[in-house]
Image: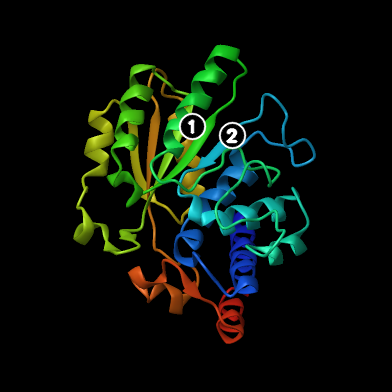
Amino acid sequence: MSELVQIAKEIRRLTVECIASFGSGHIGGSLSIVDVLTALYYKEMNVDPKNPNKENRDRLVVSKGHSGPAVYATLAHKGYFEKSELKTLNKIGTNLPSHCDMNKVPGVDMTTGSLGQGISCAVGCAIASKIKNNGAYIYAIIGDGESQEGQVWEAAMFAAHKQLDNLIVFLDLNHCQIDGTIEEVVDNGMFFEKFNSFGFDTYSIDGHNIELICETIEKAKQVKGKPHMIILNTLKGKGVSFIEEMGVKNHSIPITKEDLEKALKELE
């Protein structure tokens, strides 16, 4: 797993460089999901950068689409496109808009950013996979603030009803959203108990322990007849101390040349 830890560090570097190239962006929530992205793309998912549209591939829906820079950094590191393209983020004519766009970015399976909708798309993909009987797993990453949306729970109810055991959802529980902590805005805590009661096979783990993430995915795959929820206890801005310390204020911030140098130094 030491190799995966190093890959995660490299992806964090690329994520910060990507956002700094534009001058600002959604750094906090991007950095908090790097470890699960690393586990998925480098250990768990059946994907091929040389054939990003292969029919029986596993799929990932990053519902918290503002974390696009971390997704782009991971895809570039994996070889879906050149790393140099990361520095076009949000610029005129770019293929890398702020939020993930399946029509522009190879390897992105669903356009996201309208919060609450991604998990419904993932449920649809899981049903399609069941109909085709192609053996694919569908993964989704949702936010804790995003889970204040009613559509998340409608999708969860339907996923359990359809017994979608090929659906594995990750909740990025960093306790922060754009206007404050989730406890201050709308306290929808007890996520474990809630998803469990909705019929999910539910886990709560350290969201920055890549080995544990992989072990939990494999454990979940042994449970049949239920969709799976893996709650990732994370730190928004993980990996860069001065961003971590900002807490809720790191949702979307400027990244200066000096900030970039300081962050990259920490990520050596």
- Disc on res. 192: none
Residue at numbered disc 1: 122
Image spot of residue 26 (x, y percent): 49, 64
The quarter of the image holding the C terminus is bottom right
**Residue at image x 76%, y 52%?**
81
Q: Where's residue 183, x and y in %?
A: 21, 58
Residue 255 percent coordinates (x, y): 54, 77
Of residue 5 and residue 66, the one placed in the foreground of this image is: 66
> Circle 1 sits in a helix, a strand or a loop, which is it?
helix
* Distance CA(mark 1)–CA(mark 2): 8 Å
Residue 200 visible in rendering = no
Q: Residues within 10 Å of mark 2 (few under 14, many from 20)?
A: many
- Residue at far front of view: 92
The answer to whether any part of residue 61 appears in the image is yes
Q: Amino acid at mark 2?
A: Arg
**Residue 59, disc:** 2
Q: Amino acid at mark 1?
A: Ala
Q: Are marks 1 and 2 in contact (CB under 8 Å)?
A: yes
Give the percent coordinates (x, y) of residue 172. 40, 51
Q: What residue is drawn where x is 42% and y is 42%?
A: 170
Vertical relation: 193 (above or below) 177:
above
Q: Earlier in the sequence, mark 1 or mark 2?
A: 2
Determine whether 261 is above or below 45 in the image. Answer: below
- On the rendered structure, is 131 left or right of 185? right
Residue 16: name its quadrant: bottom right
